[in-house]
Amino acid sequence: MEITLQVPEPVVRALGSAPETLPRRALEALLVDECALGRLSRGKVAELLGLGFHDTEELLRGHRVPYSIKTSDAAARDNALLPQRR
């Protein structure tokens, strides 16, 4: 899917970066936002952007995306899904 985004020239100038970097920056911003909202995992962001672990962590840290902390109820539900030992 291709999306065309029109960015007014004053906005491009205000951003102070090369216009050719805007598509990648827009994609990164979208994926970082989805990760912050809990709809994408950190690993999925890395995969979609073609980044390694450290580069992804740097990107997310730069955007202040916190690690999600599971409640004991959520941890109990996750643990219940683990295969049982015999």
Image: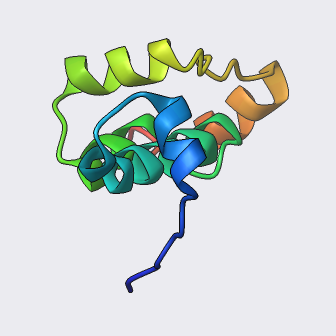
Instruction: Name the image colouring.
Output: rainbow
Q: Is residue 3 above or below residue 73?
A: below
Query: Could you tell me which residue is drawn at 62 percent across and 42 percent down?
Result: 33
Q: Is residue 15 above or below residue 3?
A: above
Quadrant in which the C terminus appears: top left
Foreground residue among 86 and 70: 70
For residue 62, side relative to residue 2 (left or right): right
Q: Is residue 42 visible?
A: yes
Foreground residue among 50 and 80: 50
Q: Is residue 81 visible?
A: no
Q: Quadrant of residue 14?
A: top right
Q: Quadrant of residue 64?
A: top right
Residue furthest out toward the bottom: 1
> Where is residue 73 shown, x and y percent of the image?
83, 29
For residue 37, side relative to residue 19 (left or right): right
Query: Could you tell me which residue is drawn at 46 percent across and 78 percent down?
Result: 4
